[in-house]
Amino acid sequence: MRFGILGPLEVLDDDGTVVPVGGPKPRALLVRLLLEAGHVVPAERLGSESPNALQAQVSRLRKVLPVEFAGGGYRIAVDADDVDAHRFGRLAREGRQRLAAGDGRGAAVVLREALALWRGAALADLADGAPAVPLEEARLAAVEDLVEAELGLAEGTPVGPLRGLVAEHPFRERLRAQLMRALHAAGRTAEALEVFHEGRRLLAEELGTDPSAELSAVHLRLLRPEPSDPVRRGPPAPITRIVGRSAELDRLAGARDARLVTLVGPGGAGKTRLAVEAARRDPREACFADLSAAPAPLAVAAALGLRDGGLAPSAAPDPVQLIAAALAGQELLLVLDNCEQALDATAALVRELLAACSRLAVLATSREPLGLTGEVLVPVGPLPAGLAAALFAERAAAVRPGFAVDAGNAAAVAGICSLVDGLPLAIELAAARLRQLDVGELAARLAQHEHFALLSRGDRTAADRHRTLHAVVDWSWRLLGDEERTAAARLSVFAGGATRTAAVAVCGVDEAALADLADRSLLVASDGRYRMLETILLFCRDRLAPPERERLERAHAEHFLALAREADPHLRRAEQLTWLATLGADHENLMAALRRSAAADRATAMRLVAALAAYWWLAGRRREVTPIAAALLDGPIEGLEEEYVSCVVHAEALASPAHRERAGEVMAALDRAVRYPFGVAVWGMARVPGAGPEPSPVILAGDPWNRALQGLGTALLDVLGGRPDEAGLLDVLAGFRALGERWGIAQGLDWLAYVASWRGDHALAHERWAAALTALDELGAVHEAADVLCRRGHDLIRQGDLDAAEADFRRAAGSAATELGLAEVARHRGDLAAAAGHLRRALDETRPGNAGTVFIRGSILTAHARLAEAGHRVAEAARRHEEAWSAVQLAPFPASLAEVLEGRAGHAALTGAAAEAARLLGRAAALRGTAVASDPDVARTAAAATEALGADGFASAYADGLRAAQ
């Protein structure tokens, strides 16, 4: 809760809601308790009420406030800093201490905060005004301290309010002396002397005394100013070490011959800190002028110390010449900070000073260039990820001793730095929150876009624009014109930036406006794109009215749906890499359009899923779409049949059997060429073979890629059906190569390699797999590449190269197939415990009946059975073999059946059924259309059966199996 007694009593709860206290008596009682918050106040000091009456008043207060009885008195159990009077006292003391230490600007900030707590006369609810006297005196003393601090700043202190204070308190000689100094600094020395004479007359007439020694000394300095060299203000001494700006400092060191260098970047990038560090390292004398709070000539003159001699640049006939005269012939580095506040005036001043002072160099900081000929620009942008994390770690350790980035929090730290755009000020504000939050919670809340609420507690002595993240961005916003603000707000509809074409189409923002916003560091321009930093984007988005935001989001979705449809046919041609790069550059926009449409326009969202099917798969991004696609499945599909099928495919395991069945019915009912052929390809890969009617060939008519895809489907059915036809696969490969389409080329090469590996031509198989991986790597199709790596890994096991096999499986990590492969490597090495762990994870990632894992589940269960056999758990092995046989019945391709039969053959040999083992091996070879060369498990089974039956007996039983399968 918050309590105010510097004015009428005010009690606010944590939400800022007023808490009613009651009438005059309970209000007066509460004020007396708050004057000594946290301490016991004896009953006799709480008013003239009788003990019973006092107890009644306390009881009323206790219904809403934490008032306690203790030791013959009462206490309100609140922190003193929750009471404005105590908070004022603390801040006033801090301000006075800063003033005594020479930190005038810091003192001014703190003292203004203290005085802002006053809402009227102190303790207004007490009939007895005596307790308010010391508070009013403390207030006046704080005002004097603030004036003293402001007199030492470039902007000075306003004369008008100070003259009013002197009129209200004519006998306070400190105020009078301050008014005299302020008038003198403004070039009004005659008025300052008149203020002294008026005070001396009042003191003599009213009090019969003379002016104090301090007031007389000021008077004497005005009459006889002592000549002295101006004292120039150097760069402020930094409190912390600069982190992550070595490259910029090197560039600044290399640009020392330039006469005008401007550090340009968004607010919070650390331009001032970098300029201070560069000036400290520069061998030349440096003078530092902050232009944010005073006109440029006045601020520069004050920084040069010209005011100390009574000069008044604002009143001089030509202030620029006055400054130039002071710098004539001198070598000096003049640091001008915050030039964006009055850019044109600052640019004019710099141009004239550089022309008049040949040995002057200027280092400026600004959110946009000064635009002068010869200006050298040094961009100051966000920190790279590693340097951002280093800055966070250093600042976090300052507020939470012992903090360090380690394996447990590295991802959260990286996320925090990314979410605040790598801006040093935002990183420091985030690190400061570790006083209250742990790093994981901080990252999670930033991910929910709570930037401005979280990063709102900066250094209270910093300039207002640097105390919170909101203030940093608001400073830039206030410098924009109305048209620029409108453009910036509209551009916040984009995620991850936009091209000029997109900005015009969606927002109606022309190229000139984009260039202006880029110059003002509201946009980052790079490679033909314009991007907002996340913090700026969130600020600008909040400036959009809801109807305008909805209109822009609709236009945004329509634009990117049109882009997706334009790109789709090109993704099935030789130019697919160019179009993948085009869509990849706008991936964040595509996802934003999809998410927003999923919430507001289901039909558009479904069209985006379908139109981008080739992109999702070729770019290895299909898993990002899964939850959104699943959320779109329920609802009408009339006119969206093809889009619905694409959503079912992309929903993967989240699509129910009912939705998969419905998708099959939709595909079977199609009697026209599909709009999105790649959707047919992924539907064919995802469906359970034999589940439902087959679609009509007409759906792939009329397009060379469609014909090649149709040929691929036929060839794969032949391979899996026990008719491995390399000629057909070579024709498919030729078709895709004629188009230059890498995904299809990789599919053809992969299956050709698979067939070659079955017959033992390992060199040819690996040559083809290597070419397939090259094509998939060019696309970025990581999931398809993982499938290829797993097939190659199993062939490496058959060749006995377990290390190379393990490397392939680990490179493909992240699926049940990779866990199966690693389990097989471990089993062949004899590490049964490791193999068991991998198989548990593999089985956990599959579910019976899941279309996405139906082909591999039988293999995993067979591997489980073989592992049980290696551990002499025969009964468990038998059960696993039966489970494997049941699993492959869901997709009874002969090739899948053959693999399970070979596993059962091994179990038969182990249990003494050698003839059955040989028959099963023959049956498997017949189903697959070939035996798999070099398979160590099959070879071990065949050897055991041959040893038991003899060569002729084995051959006879094997032949029986061949005939049975046929």
Image (tube, rainbow, N blue to C red):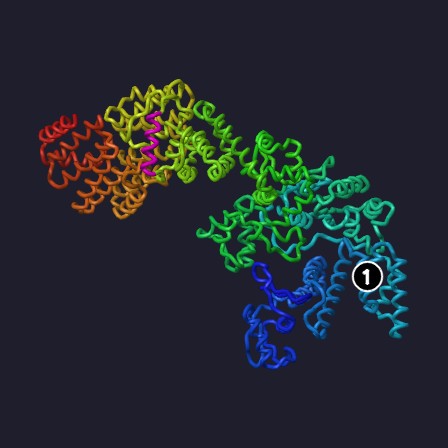
Horizontal and vertical percent position of residue 245: 60, 46
Q: Which of 534 and 823 is in front in this view?
A: 534
398 with respect to 511 (left or right): left
**Other residues around mark 1 within 10 Å, as few (<14) / some (14–19) / many (≥20):** few
Q: Position of residue 16 (x, y in %)?
A: 59, 59
Q: Is residue 64 above or below residue 446?
A: below
Quarter of the figure with residue 219: bottom right
- Residue 129 in magenta stretch: no
Q: Residue at x 20, y 47 (%)?
A: 871
Q: How many labels does the image show?
A: 1
Predominant SS along the magenta part: helix
Residue 870 shows in this picture: yes
- Please indicate whether residue 204 sits to the left or right of residue 723 in the image: right
Q: Look at the image and tell me whether residue 363 can be seen.
A: no
| x 88%, y 64%: residue | 196
Report x, y in % for residue 708.
36, 21
Q: Which residue is drawn at 74% across and 67% down?
A: 141
Could you tell me the amino acid type at mark 1? Gly
In depth, the one of 352 and 859 nearer the eye is: 859
Q: Position of residue 158 (x, y in %)?
A: 79, 56
Residue 666: in magenta span: yes
The residue lying toward the viewer, choosing from 858 and 604, is 604
Left/right of residue 847 with respect to residue 629 in the rendered view: left
Identify the residue at image location x=89%, y=61%: 193
Q: In which quarter of the image is the C terminus?
A: top left
| Pointer 1 residue | 164
Q: Is mark 1 on a helix, strand or loop?
A: helix
Q: What stretch is highlighted in magenta?
A: 656-669
